[in-house]
Image (tube, grey):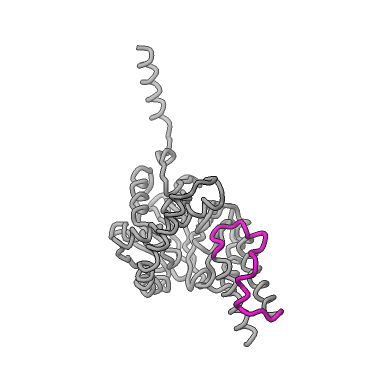
Amino acid sequence: MRLITILFFFTIFLYSCKVDRSDRFESVNFELVKLGDGVYSCIHKFGGKAICNVGIVDNGEETIIFDSFLSPDVAKELLEVLKEMDLSPLKYVVNSHSHNDHIRGNQTFPNDIKIISTTRTRDLIEEWEPLDIAEEKKYAPTRYSYYDSLYNSFSGDTLSREYQQILMWRPYYETLLNSHLEIETRLPDTYVDSIQNFDGPNRRIQLISKGPGHTESDLILYLPDDKIIFSGDLIFNKCHPYVPHGSISNWKNWLDYMNSLEVNTIMPGHGEIGAKKLINHMKNYLLNLEISASNLHKYDQSIEKIGMVPIPDEYKDWWFDRFYEMNLKFAYEVSKKVEKE
């Protein structure tokens, strides 16, 4: 009898505590992180299929999702999580840029949810998604088979970088394979090409576009009162960004602009949540690329020699290291073009 009484009062205590139900949410795909009242991040987990990070912001009147994952299935999981959270009605999903890992969850959201991007991002999605999907159907099966075989045969330290690399790429190619069976590209239908406010009784929200950067057109979400930026792929944390679809000079301008804002917290497109110093880390990476490319020209090195250039010590432990050679080649070609002019 005493045990029953204790359990009864313990249950009453739990219900009397205003515990956000999302705090108890567990997923193999992403970690739900509370940044403030009504502000959350979904941070991709190694071995999961989220691939990119996603933001959730409630202004007290409406909720906005920032990016939508690579996997429609993980986007469905996000919708189920939202049902368990005490948030305002979902009204908008933002696509920070056109890359597949930030947009393919679009199709999961109800038709009355507006998809926001820049005008150019919308055009890029419409132009490139059919071509990208056709190419992925050719290479994804082979690459998934390769990483799956490594995964199944691995017998070493599961905390090693080697194993973590497998956990990073195997789900990506598996997600491509699965999504090709159901993908229906949903284009953005609402556009922000400069600055637009989505203010509510609880907070101010700004969507900001300043043109090319990581891609031909990028969009960030800024919370001036919370001092939080959801940066999309303009900022990576301890990951090599993919540079060749963008403009290094404009990307640096973007980072200078973000540095001018009052910021305490940044949710990058990939990697863990960090402080404002992530902005300078990203800019230094781009500057390093430019200096390395300039030195290759200075010493009359051909582009074929770039594969022999080691990753600088400060970036050798960053993830997505396969991108470094591609990034340096891109910077080299830009440097060569500038030199001719």
Quick check: 327 above or below 175? below
Which residue is rendered at x = 48% and y = 54% of the image?
166
Q: At which x and y percent is residue 28?
A: 42, 46
First to last magenta residue range? 299-322
60 or 24, which lies in front?
24
Residue at the extreme top of the image, as rendered: 1
Q: At which x and y percent is residue 282?
A: 60, 62
271 or 207, which lies in front?
271
Q: At which x and y percent is residue 13?
A: 41, 26
* Count of number-bearing discs: 0
Is 125 part of what is drawn in magenta? Answer: no
Residue at the extreme bottom of the image, as rendered: 341
Image quarter in which the N terminus is found: top left
Which residue is rendered at x = 33% and y = 45% of the image?
83
Residue at the extreme right of the image, as rendered: 299
Q: Give left or right: position of 99 versus 240.
A: left
Residue 137 seen in the current view: yes
Which residue is rendered at x = 54% and y = 60% of the image?
320
Q: At which x and y percent is residue 90?
A: 35, 53
Is 319 part of what is drawn in magenta? Answer: yes
Residue 59 seen in the current view: no
Quick check: 180 above or below 30? below
Magenta stretch prevailing secondary structure: loop
